[in-house]
Amino acid sequence: MNNQNQILGVFDDPDVVTNAVKVLLKNDVKVKDVFSPFPLEHVWDLLKLKTRIPYATFIYGAVGTSSVFAFLYWTSVISYPLTFGGKPHNSLSFVVLMFVLTILSGVIFTLATLLIREKMWPGKKVTLPDSRSMDDKFVIVIDKNKDMDEATVKKIDELLMKSGAVEVNGSNV
Amino acid sequence: MYNINVRGVLIEGNKRYHDITRDVTNPILTNKTPLWWWITAFLASGMLVWGIWGFYNTITVGTGTWGLNNSVSWGWAIINFVWWIGIGHAGTAFSIFLLVLHQKWRTSINRAAEAMTIFAVMAAGMFPLIHMGRIWNGFFVFPYPNTRGPLWDNFNSPLFWDVMAISTYLTASFLFWYVGMMPDFATIRERTTSKIKKKIYNILSFGWVGSARGWLRFEAAALLMGGLTAPLVVSVHSIVATDFAAGVVPGWHSTIFPPFFVVGAIFSGFAMVLTMMIIVRKVYKYEEYVTQRHLDAIARVLTFVSLIMGVAYISEIFIAWYSDSPYEMFVFFKNRTAGEYAYSYWAMITFNALMPQLFWFKKIRQNITIVFIISIFINVGMWYERFVIVVTSLSKTWLPSTWHGYSPTATEIAIYVGTIGFFILGLLAFLRFLPMMAISELKGINKETSMITEKPENHE
């Protein structure tokens, strides 16, 4: 176990694992990641994780709105102005298409951003540190540094066990 | 914090996380396809084959094979189009409105409701396509630089908005549905022992691992996609309603149409969800996930929406009288309520406004058989509503010399039956190969709403 470069703390309860992360951070242990079968909001806060996807989505929406308006203005006013009933070429009803296509561009590009940021693609080969984290286990991953001596590793193992881990394993993944 | 005492547990049977994984993935991982599946698939394929005959007939001969005439130029095709679109509103209404309202009981139903949306909207989309008559010119609906001027589409026409709104709705719902399934595909990938299935579900899962950062981004993106799609529920059917309301036909030219259509769509969508979930929970023995309380909650929503429908019907009649327009008065007091299609009007009133009021009684809400029957009647009633709107109005417009009756031909019936077959086949494929409940979401609500953790002797 000692020649493996990661320590895995395996838990079976979402609240216990959240608490364990808190304990580890208090003891200056660097938590690399937590793998879980469903989202754990408190862990994000503890690990100070943030995402800027909402800002990106706003930009995609804004770009969608303005480009659709530009297209409608170009086709209906510049390229082929068609007068009927004395109505203005630059019509207020463009709002409907701008609304719908803003949503379309927001949805598509938000998904694209998620996939790019998470480096996900169909058929990507992945190896989980512990495949049970897709079922009913919550796995805390801690990197073993080179300068980490035997005693520190032991301390981390003990901390994990004390905060309610069902198993403490090593992994190379 | 969710108050457990108000609604009772959401997942019965004190499930552990592993039990949820097992219960949802087992029907997918088994190599034995149940007999009922083959029988239903066979019947649905038969329906689809008949529908393909209808399509073939229409494409090779033309819309002359339909019962349409100069007066009633919109028949079953438009009725069924609006009907399917209405059913297609269930998924988004379920996943997103209830997500925004923090209604956690949606978790065991939303995936199936979204799947229903996808197939219903695809079925709906076939009708405008086939209604073109010359389907090979279908690409004319898209704005592309062409050699005709370039002459662009009419961007102020509700019909063009429809093209955009429905294709956007289909795309957005599909992507939202798919994103929600990625973690569950990963669960199946880790659980299956078959090499081929592992490969397929790995492709489908996009290599999802479920790290903390991954979940954070996933939740942010899913919520944004859901939040963006939510207004589409309102806009799609409003635009469909504008197809009618922008026309100067008595009975159509009314500002009540968009909200009336949106409510009707949610009504029929929820009814179809109820129909489907009652069958699914019975066949797959998911009574512990889709509990009596889930069905009760849908029935309550239907009662409320049915009241809105009733008010809409009454206000249409009131406005016709209040407008003092002889044409509007004729539509509501002579044509619809007492004319040759009066049966459809009264079927609509009975099935949509009156019958769901039975849900006020707890005894009826708890009797699954009666709930199932009422949900079927609502689906029929909503079909009649579209029939009333399209056929009664068009068959008797301004000039009595243009009055003409309408009855569908075998080709039209075949196309309708074919889309039902397509819908059923789609759902069957979904039930067989995809996780029909959101595994990760069920696990997410399990502890705070359903698990009894104080008593370790209950575990396993």
Image (cartoon, rainbow, N blue to C red):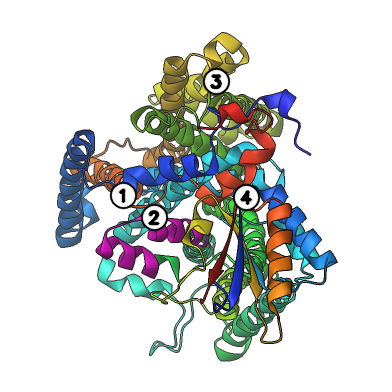
Q: Crowding near pointer 1: few (<14 within 10 Å), some, many (20+)?
A: some
Secondary structure of the residue carrying numbered label 3: helix
Q: Is residue B270 above or below residue A85?
A: above
Q: Which chain hosts label 4?
A: B
The CA span between labels 1 and 2 is 9 Å
Q: Which chain hosts label 1?
A: B
Residue under label 1: B29
Q: Residue at x 47, y 20 (%)?
A: B371
Q: Crowding near pointer 2: few (<14 within 10 Å), some, many (20+)?
A: many
Query: Pointers 1 and 2 in contact (CB under 8 A)?
Result: yes
Residue under label 3: B356
Q: Crowding near pointer 4: few (<14 within 10 Å), some, many (20+)?
A: many
Relative side of B44 to B292, left or right = left
Q: Amino acid at mark 4?
A: Ile
Camera-side residue of B333 and B102:
B102
Q: Which chain hosts label 2?
A: B
Query: Pointers 4 and 1 in contact (CB under 8 A)?
Result: no
Residue under label 2: B191
Whether residue B201 is visible to the viewer of this picture, yes or no, is: yes
**Image quadrant in which you'd find residue B276:** top left
Which badge, 4 or 3, is on the more N-terminal residue? 4
Start-end of magenta stretch: B179-203
Q: Residue A12's x, y, as percent?
A: 60, 49
Which badge, 4 or 1, is on the more N-terminal residue? 1
Q: Which chain hosts label 3?
A: B
The CA span between labels 3 and 2 is 43 Å
Residue under label 4: B96
Q: Amino acid at mark 3?
A: Pro
Q: Amino acid at mark 2?
A: Arg
Relative side of B329 to B153, left or right = right
* Residues behind callouts 4 and 2 on a single chain: yes
